[in-house]
Amino acid sequence: MDELPFDIKALTFFFEQLWMHTSDPFWICRPVGDDFELVMANAAARKVDERQVPGGTVRSIIGYGPESEPLISGYYECMRTGRSVTFEQRPVLNGSERLFETLLVPVKDESGAISHIWGTARDLTRFLVAQKALLNLNEQLETKIRQRTTELEEANRRLYELSATDALTGLANRRRFDDVMREEWLRAVRAGAPLSLIMLDLDHFKKYNDHCGHQEGDECLRRIAEVLQANARRPGDLAARYGGEEFCLILPDTARSGARDIAERVRLCVEEMALPHPLSTHGIVTVSLGTATLSPGPADNPSSLLSMADRALYLAKSEGRNCVRQAAFQDI
């Protein structure tokens, strides 16, 4: 055996001082059946857990719950391998979770059998507290990010609505109309379903504006918009201001007869409002409407439906106004 760098007496004194004055828990156990009896424990060990009294066993001190498993498993591994083991423990002491890095070292007798196991533990609870604080900070940060993301999405949605809404009437504007027209056209192509369009124009609106003033003209446009919006009853229907005194209704999955019925209902609703129009042949504000319906194919494009509805509208205006006309060419 190699000669020790200092004598046993000095070494014993050194370990006695370490045992008594260190802030780290130290203890010594001996195997008893399938348990381990506590032989000695320093003051630091008793301070951590006052149950660590010599004569008690590991099981009697820490019980049989999940908290005890790392320590018991460590003892068994130490006995099985005959080597020291290091592991983490997270016991709950005095109502608070603690974190220890535990070291168990086997002590063998002259025959090589393990007679005792001594252990020590470093208290790393401050790191656990810091870790929990960091996790809590991350959760708060993630919550704020989710909140800001939601707010940003909502702001973007409102911004899009503003950019896609006609300021005067509150209906979809031309930009939104074009977007939805393309979307519904492609959907109709995929589904092989009919797509209908109604175009509406106020009769003699320039005369109304000139005679009644632009303020009354704006109010008239808003009232017409209300009628259109009320008749865009299904989720996919879209009422839009196409430009000036022209309006449109996009009607997905609507056949020719359905489009005519809706157009006639709009015409009657405007007529029944009976808004005075001194320069109109009818004496009230009226509208002319043209409808068109297609079951579009891959080779078609939305402009064909727009052209058909526009020609039907022109026909309604040329045949006396305050009426509904349908495009002559239909494929359903």
Image (tube, grey):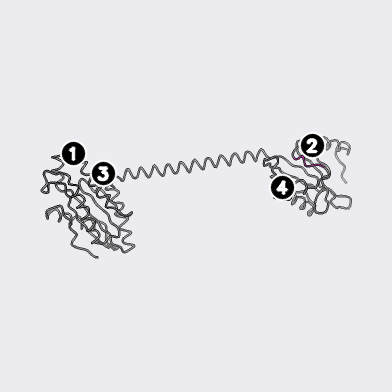
Q: CA distance from mark 3 to mark 2?
A: 83 Å
Single out the mark in the foreground, 4 or 2. Answer: 2
Kind of residue at disc 1: His
For label 4, the crowd category at 10 Å Cα-Cα, with few meaning under 14, some 14 to 19 and many 20 or more, is some
Kind of residue at disc 3: Thr
Element class at badge 4: strand
Q: CA distance from mark 4 to mark 2?
A: 22 Å
Mark 1 or mark 2: name the one nearer the start of the chain: 2
Label 4 with label 1: CB-CB less than 8 Å: no
Q: CA distance from mark 4 to mark 3?
A: 72 Å
Q: CA distance from mark 1 to mark 3?
A: 14 Å
Dividing the picture into quadrants, the one containing residue 118 is top right
Q: Nearer the viewer, residue 226 or 112?
A: 226
Q: Which residues are magenta?
A: 49-53
Identify residue for label 3: 169
Label 4 with label 3: CB-CB less than 8 Å: no
Element class at badge 1: helix
Q: Residue 214: which disc?
A: 1
204 w.r.t. 295: above or below: above
For label 2, the crowd category at 10 Å Cα-Cα, with few meaning under 14, some 14 to 19 and many 20 or more, is some
Q: Residue 87: which disc?
A: 4
Q: Residue at x 21, y 51 (%)?
A: 269
Q: Nearer the viewer, residue 94 or 272?
A: 272
Mark 1 or mark 3: name the one nearer the start of the chain: 3
Question: Magenta part mainly helix, strand or loop?
Answer: loop
Label 3 with label 2: CB-CB less than 8 Å: no
241 w.r.t. 8: above or below: below
Left or right relative to 313: residue 46: right
For label 3, the crowd category at 10 Å Cα-Cα, with few meaning under 14, some 14 to 19 and many 20 or more, is some
Identify residue for label 2: 43
Left or right relative to 15: residue 180: left
Q: CA distance from mark 1 to mark 2?
A: 94 Å
